Each structure stands twice: as structure tokens, then as C-alpha cells.
Amino acid sequence: MIREPDVTFVTHSDPIDTPVLRKERGAFFTPAEITRFISKWAIRAPNDRVLEPSAGDAAFLVSAVDRLRELALRRSSPPTVHGVEIHAHSADVARKRVSDAGGKADIQLSDFFSVEPHPEFDVVIGNPPYIRYQDFTGEARARARAAAIRGGISLTGLASSWAAFTVHSALFLQPGGRLAFVLPAELLSVNYAAPVRKFLFSRFRDVQLVLFDEQVFPEAEADVVLLLADGYLEGPTDHATVRQTKNAATLDTLGPGQTWTPADPAAKWTSSLIDVEAVHLLQSLCETGLYTNLESWGDTTLGMVTGNNRYFTLSPQRVAELGLRPDELLSVSPPGSSHLRGLSLSSAQLRKLGEGGNAIHLFYPTDPPSKAAAAYIADGHRTGVDTAYKCRVRKTWYRVPLVPPADLLLTCMNADTPRITENAARARHLNSVHGIYLNEAYRALGRALLPVASLNSITLLHAEMVGRAYGGGILKIEPKEADVWAMPSPTLVASRADKLRNLKRSVAKLLDKGRLLDAVNIVDQVLLGDGEVSATQMAAVRNARSELANRRNLRAASGR
């Protein structure tokens, strides 16, 4: 529930409701421009029955009353609007605000997921509670999942509250009804929203998305989209209309948008944000076998979880202080990934990192431990390292479960784009990066050339499409997302092997200077410069990638 502020009724000094309590139940403030826009789009007749299932202090219901009165200038009785609200004080505020606006509020005090759906409304509007899965637990989650199942979908345990809320809300609509919600932009990009995306395309005749260039709710730490779904139970549809605007204040000048048709409605909708020519080229390159997904090259996995990196990963200087033996240490890529921005992590580079004070050793004592290792273990027990959850559940708390050295290392948190680096040092990796274990048939080729071949415009664009934007403009990619990430195929890389090898030194120098896109340009010429992709097509791909990256960074900047 992202709400419009009203200093008359909800103040920071209110003993009944506080900003902390509102955040815990997913309540934030909605700009009036958005409530007016949604009400105007959704409410089309003076007798429309309107429901706001997370009424809060009636920001949407007041706008609904204004809209209903506008449509029926000769109405003698106040229009009635309906709502559900879990918080008693907010419900009281909502009733008074609706009355002051010239309407009548029928607000039920309840958890919306406990309300039995009856298809009696023409319009459902609002802004569902946004509670992340970590905090969305217990009976509340159980009721939400049951509500989603009534709508014919099953949600994973990672789903935030809004997902089930959206599905449950639609069940209150009459055939032909309209659903207009402010939703997290997670609708477009997260895996757990796949059933919701499919639900919307299967149930509604018309689906529209309104996207913002700037962050609308910086205090909520979440980007949003407006979902405008028309014609309930008159679907399915095979396309959506995507409309874009700068911020809430520019909604009045919103253009007609463009039609977007996904190959699979359940898949991520990130491609709705970019030029269809770029999407078609990507699909064509995959269909012809020039590109494939990363999983075709090998398996991407999470790294080791120590439970306490400060304790278990050690610099050479710290090893010397503790007097640990070489056989009690394993080589490890240091925590973080800032050192993995080039093409290779060599043994010499790892040593240099260690000389600079980085933790390049993993503490892994022998059995029985040496005297020095035993002393360090005792110190870990004294300082409570063994009480951390990951340590506590191990058979031997100080022995980190190992993963074998990966062929390649993949950065998962990125300011620019995910990087693939050859693990020439054969170091083990922590969960701050992912490991890629290449298939035997492609191991030699992949180790030598996939890090450079992956630096091409097609792959950079697809990273923006399969990854997800996090706070600060960071692009995160998880192993399951990496599995479907578009890469040059082994066949294409093998056919360009000599040219790619000759290119590696130049690319490495450019990367060392921070000139990523210059490096990408020369890789493009080698991989796709023999007529596979026209200059016009390549420009479309580069522009599409730039738009997605700029959008990610612009939203981060506007949220600061």
C-alpha cells in the first residue's frame, strides 16, 4: 500500500500509526498525480462499482469519488466506494476523508486475503502492500498463497506480498472489469512473478504497462510500474501496450505507447523496454545457432559460504602472524569481485593481490590441526565465530564445505555488466561470485576464449534483460539467470578462435583502463563483422543496451 500523505490525519507523532509500522505492513505514500491518473483510466461510468483492497487512508478512494462525481454531475446522492483495510486507524481516516470528499465509504476492516472474493466490481484500483519474502511469513503468507491458488496460480516461497494480492484482487471483478495497480517493477523481471505475468495475459483482453524513467517512491527503495488491465475474463491476449513517462508529474502527457508481444508471457518482460528490432535480432542469432545460452557451455554454481569471511579468509600477512602452515590453507579468490574485471585471474595476479593485503587464503586446517591452527580455532570459539548459523550447522564448525576450483569466475553484482574471467590460478570462489564449470568438450576453448567472446553487444544487452536491477543501479545475475544468458555458441567461437586470441591483449589493456565499451566494439567486429549483423542492427542492439543500463542508473540516481 503506497499511500498519499495527509498531515491532518497521519502524522509522525500519531501514537496509533508510525512510519515504522506503516513500512512493516508495506504502506507508503502515493503521489496524487498517480491516484488521479489511475482513477481516470479505470472509472468510466457514474455507476461503476469501485473497490480499493488496501484502502489505507483513502488516497485512491478519494480520487475515485472525485472521478465518479465528475462523471455524474447531476447525482443527488454521494457516490459509494468500497475498500478493505487491515489497520483500524487508517480505516477511520479513510472513512472521514471519503466523506469530506463528498462520498460514502464502505470499508471492511480485515486482512484482504481473508475476504472471500465475489465478482461484483467493475473496477479494482490501488497499490498493493509490498512486503519482501523475508518479512512475509507465517499465517499471512499461508493466506496469501491460498488466495493465489484460488486464482489458479501457485507462487514460490520467494514471492513478495504484492504477487498474491494482484491475483486475489482480480477475482473481485465482474467479467469485463478493470484492474489498475501500482506494482513493483519486479513484475517485469523477477522469476517468482512468472505466474502473475501469465495470469494477466490469460485473463485480460488488454494489458498496458506505464513505466517511469525516474524513481517514484525513493523511500520504498523499489521501482514501480502502473499495471492497467482491461476486460477481465475476456482474454487471453498475446501482447501488451508499453507506455513510458518521466515521472508522476508527466502522466498527463503520456503518449499512446508501443505494442509488445512476448514469446512467452510467463518469461521476463524486460524486453518490453527496448526496441523490437534488437529483440528480433537476438532471437534470430539464437535460432541460427550463432548464439546459445551459457548453460550450453557448462554449469554455473554458487560459491562457498564460510559463515564469516573475516575469520576464514586470510591475507598472507595475517597467515604469517598466526604461524599457519601452507597445508592448512587453500587458494581463494578474495571476497568481492572488483579484482575480476579483466580476462584472467592468474597465480601471479593472485599473489599480487595478497601482497596488497587481500585475503587470498582460505583457512582449512588439517585433522588434527597444528598447534597454530588449534590456537586460531580456540580464538574463533572465544569470539563466537562458531555460533553463526552456517558454522553452527556444520559437523565441524571450522571446516568450510568446499567447492572445486571453477574453470571460469562470473561476477554476480555489477555496476556495468557481468564479467567472465578465466580462473587460471585455480582458486576456489566464495559466494560473492559464481563459478562456471565447463563441459569437457568445450573446456579448453571456453577457458581461453569465452571471457573475451562474452564481451560483445548481444551478450551485454541480454545481461540487462535476464539480470535484475538492485539498489544503487547494480545489475545482479543469479545462476539460474546465467543459465539462459545469451553467449556466442561454441561453433561461432571456434570459427573465430585465431582472431579472438590475437585480440585478447588489446582487450585486456582496454579493460585495465576501464574502457569496456571500446573493448566490446572490437570484439563485435571479430564475432559479427562478416555480415551476420548489419550496422543498423548493431546500432539498435547497442542503443537498447544503453537504454536499459541508463534506466537502471537513472533510477538509482533519482532515488538518492
Image (cartoon, rainbow, N blue to C red):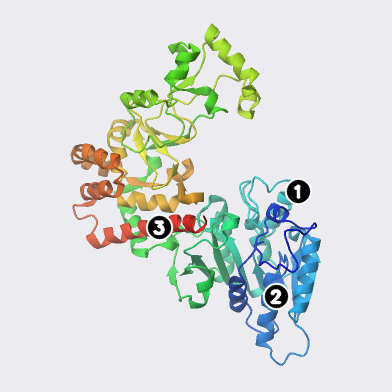
Is the residue 51 above or below the residue 439 in the image?
A: below
Horizontal and vertical percent position of residue 553? 44, 55
Q: Which residue is mark 1?
A: 139
In the picture, measured across the screen, residue 63 lies left or right of residue 489, that is: right
Mark 3 nearby-residue class (10 Å; few <14, some 14–19, many ≥20): some
Q: Nearer the viewer, residue 282 or 465?
A: 465
Sequence-earlier tag: 2 or 3: 2
Secondary structure of the residue carrying numbered label 2: helix
> CA–CA distance between discs 1 and 2?
31 Å
Residue at point 57%, 60% (across, down): 217
Q: Secondary structure at mark 3?
A: helix
Relative to residue 206, is residue 78 drawn left or right?
A: right
For the point 36% across and 25% down, the residue is 350
Q: Give the labeled residue for mark 2.
A: 62
Q: Is residue 173 visible?
A: no
Is disc 2 in contact with disc 3, using a CB cutoff of under 8 Å?
no
Where the N terminus falls, by quadrant? bottom right
Q: How many marks?
A: 3
Asked if residue 155 is positioned above or below residue 318 in the image, the reply reads below
Amino acid on which the number 1 mark rests in the picture: Glu
Which residue is farthest bottom? 74
Residue holding disc 3: 550
| Res 21 label | none
Tell me where residue 179 sits by quadrant. bottom right
The residue at the point 56 percent across, 67 percent down is: 227
Asked if residue 293 is positioned above or below residue 424 in the image, the reply reads: below
Mark 2 is surrounded, within 10 Å at the Cα level, by few (under 14), some (14 to 19) or many (20 or more) other residues, namely: many
